[in-house]
Amino acid sequence: MANIELTQLKGIGPSIVEKLNLIGIFNLRDLCFHLPFGYQDRTKITQIVNLQPGDEKLIKVKILSAQSLYRPRKMMVLKSTDESSTINVRFFYFHPAQTRQLKAGTELLCYGKVSLSRYGLEMIHPEYEVISSDHALKDKKLTPVYRVPKGIGQKKIRGFIHAAISKLDFAEDFLDVEKYDSSLNMKIIDALATIHNPDAGINIEEMLPGGSHPARVRLLKEEMIAFQAGMAFLKRKQKRHQAFPLFKENEWTAEVQSNFPFELTSAQARVVSEIKEDLSQAVPMMRLVQGDVGSGKTVVGALAAALALDSSLQVAFMAPTTLLAEQHFLSLKLFFNKQAGKVALLTGSTSSSQRKKILQDLKENKIKLIVGTHALFQKSVEFSNLALIIIDEQHRFGVNQRLALRKKNDSETLAPHQLTLTATPIPRTLSMSVYANMDVSIIDELPPGRKPIQTSCLPLSGKDKLIERMLAATKQGSKVYWICPLIEESENLDLNAVMETYEDLSEHFSQEKVGCLHGKLSANKKQEQIQAFKDSKTSILVSTTVVEVGVDIPDADIMVIENAERFGLAQLHQLRGRIGRGTKESFCILLHKDKIQDVSSQRLQVLVDSQDGFKIAEEDLVIRGPGEIMGAQQTGIVPMKYTNLVRDSQYLMETKKVAELICNEEPELANQLIERWISGSIAFADA
Ligand code: ADP
Ligand code: MG
């Protein structure tokens, strides 16, 4: 099936192939595994009296009267009845032929969504069919609803999928997974047939995402097994590489120890010892350190780096943005004070002459520690003996960038160790699957002396008063981040908002006290703005979300976030993590539109009530539903068709066990499962 081309089906030509490709359908098997996200029940007629607003139902009616109206806009209203009650069927777009056809006395089957207007129940633009009064219903099965690309309708894709399934042969079913998990004893062919065309009378809820119908569970578990088998293979592959064992502690380590002004928290110390244990081995470390914003991941990274540097080997420290790379460069130079000459920065903004020099020094092993952005991935960057890669805030990197990095270590005979730092709060069971190829350490403790951030919500109408309060606060020595709204995804619009706010605030504060930071500034200008704020030359920094990750100015103690309702909770949590880093009492004010929906204010309330990233993520899950929690960037690393690892996490542990069993006993089967479910996904193909 995997190698049967789409064009083998009647009605599929090159232009349709192109459209199907857009939603990840490349062959007949992909069509079979393109599963519905909903169903319509057209197998039975509902009486009008039994309709509730919001229902999507099939009704059988006789038109009592048909009227074309022109106010407020052109429309056709069919007053209709089924003897139990009446309903208005309303069309806004219609042909003259329809006006002629849809007359009093005509009988119709209508399928659509029921709503309630002040004239009573309505169905707007239903799918309809003119029928005779003795019409018998044809449909015995529920009608599936699919995700479709632009230009292909439901009816068409249903036809294609139906045709593809009828070509499904026994070979597809041949994979003998049930031997490893008796709960998988339904044939895949039957599970697919049921999912695509369930019998009427089935509980639709059970068939939908989150439901527990055996056919759904059958498919879902198999996909999870395939995914986890893929991760298990990946892990094994990594372990086959060799790496430099790192255990010497010398001047670099001594430098960090003498220049870091605090005691490590016990969580930091534990994580550092886990890393040390890994690094002392001759196989590459693959370790993920999860720690909430402000938990102190940077110093952990620096200590790991020191261990490689003390063996006279090289380290690459990657950050997702230029701004953050620069911040890290500065803090690492402070950490490694006496060795600072061997630390360099390479970003997209590095001048070409500097860049040339850096690349040369890197090759000649004069530079030991290089800090940078994705510019470090480029082919031209060659190391003399790269022993450790540290990736900060890895959720910010796209899949492709991470792959480039991985390739870098694959080409070497000795692979570098890899340490990933992230603040993304993913529940533990989940990270054990998504990051199954890594070992996970958690920094579950904040440095001592932190006071909780006082968070409050404020409607926009209170903004003037707020500005007055900020003015007073800065006179008392406070430092304020003022975060501007994210308007759509457009940088230009963001910029307008920032400039407006900047000018606005400059009028209230004396101009030189207000700084301004956004993505369009040159790297130098950005750095200047941060430095001025750090040195307290400015006391209020108007900024876009460029400060979201990594910026560390411990005495900044107030953050105002405009239009907070537009941000995701996780992002708000990240932003807020810029304050509350020192020992001062800090305040976060979430400015929002005067009128916001209940859900929005409920969401903001979560932030008011909690400062725990994991808890916030979980609450977000409850309020928003699981689909969004992992965000666009996250979905790229979980290339699954059917499973949502958050929603379906209850099956994670058992399927992980089954996957491991299959990998051990029948690797060929594992490969076939991977091929069936996640073939073509870069994450595995190139790893
Ligand atoms: P993260 O990257 O985890 O968000 P950082 O590494 O930027 O956090 O650290 C946040 C702040 O906490 C920094 O100002 C850092 O100097 C400080 N810090 C880190 N570890 C400790 C510690 N053990 N004790 C006190 N302060 C610490
Ligand atoms: Mg950080």
Image (cartoon, helix red, strand yellow):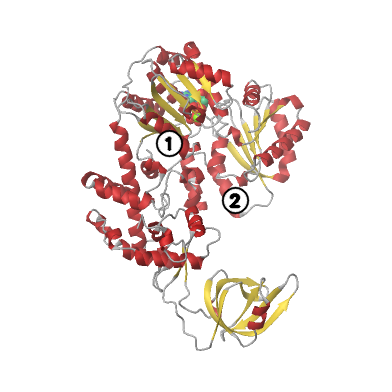
Amino acid type shown at disc 2: Ser
Identify the residue under disc 2.
600
Residue placed at 68% from the left, 21% from the top?
537
Residue placed at 48% from the left, 10% from the top?
338
Marks 1 and 2, the one that precedes in the sequence = 1
Q: Is residue 111 left or right of residue 561?
A: left
Q: Where is residue 575 shown, x and y percent of the image?
A: 57, 36
Along the viewing direction, whichever of 587 and 290 lies nearer the viewer: 290
Q: Is residue 665 left or right of residue 107?
A: left
Q: Where is residue 288 shown, x and y percent of the image?
A: 40, 34
Alpha carbon distance from label 1 to label 2: 37 Å
Q: Are marks 1 and 2 in contact (CB under 8 Å)?
A: no
Q: Where is residue 119 shown, x and y percent of the image?
A: 67, 76
Q: Is residue 134 left or right of residue 526?
A: left
Which quadrant of the figure has residue 215?
bottom left
Identify the residue under disc 1.
403
